[in-house]
Amino acid sequence: MSGQATTMTRALITGLAVALLLLSAAPASAATPCWLQVHNDWSDNGRIDGRYADSCYEQALRNLPSDAQIYSDAADVIAAARERALRRSTQARPGQPEARSRPRGDDANGPIGTALNWGQRAAGDIPLPLFALAGIALLLTAAGGAGLVSRRLHARHAAPGDDPGDTDS
């Protein structure tokens, strides 16, 4: 193998390795504070669908950004969810499991909407389908690069008189 082909092969292998590492690396993040989970739950669809501890609701109200307090109903929605949680906790009987209701609007968008929104939990998250498209693009680029390298390697090893495109013989 010549020096240029070896360099191209190394560059291709290095590029593939970096692409695989980027695709397989999970985001390293600490546990999300419960008040932020409440904020994310509200920013998802304007409702609080999950159940949280009373302290989480209190912290969520304390940490609510001023623009959300002024321009949205977040404080009202969080306070109402806190009241529902307190009401549920006082109505729960010892020894009986609490009935869990399914959040409204789970299947409102159907299977396509569910697939497109799957994995997106917080307002700043990147949608999962975008990662899938980026992965497919990287794989197609890598396949094209491998084909280019393969053609060049075959062309170097072919006899000087052999022309695969020559049909005059």
Image (cartoon, grey):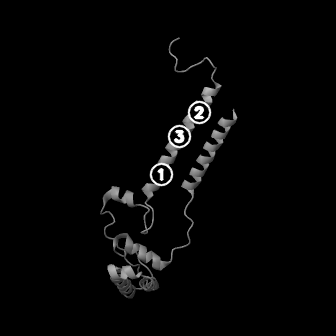
Mark 2, secondary structure of its residue = helix
Q: Which residue has dot 2 on it?
A: 150
Residue 26 is left or right of residue 83, and the answer is right
SS of the residue under disc 3: helix
Percent across and percent down for residue 146 are: 57, 38
* Distance from the alpha carbon under mark 1 to that under mark 2: 24 Å
Residue drawn at 31 percent across, 70 percent down: 104
Residue at 55% in and 35% down? 147
Residue 59, position as x, y percentages in the image: 46, 84
**Disc 3 packing (10 Å; few <14; some 14–19; many ≥20):** some
Q: Nearer the viewer, residue 78 or 160?
A: 160
Mark 1 burial class by Cα count in 10 Å: few <14, some 14-19, many 20+: few
Q: CA distance from mark 1 to mark 3?
A: 14 Å
Q: As drawn, which residue projects farthest toward the top? A: 169
Residue 139: x, y in percent? 51, 45
Labelled disc at residue 143: 3
- Point out the tag, 1 or 3, that comes first from the N-terminus: 1
- Point out the tag, 3 or 2, that comes first from the N-terminus: 3
The residue identified by callout 1 is 134
Question: Residue at the spot x=59%, y=18% of the render?
Answer: 162
Q: Quadrant of the N terminus?
A: top right
Amino acid type shown at disc 3: Ala
Percent position (x, y) of residue 25?
57, 58
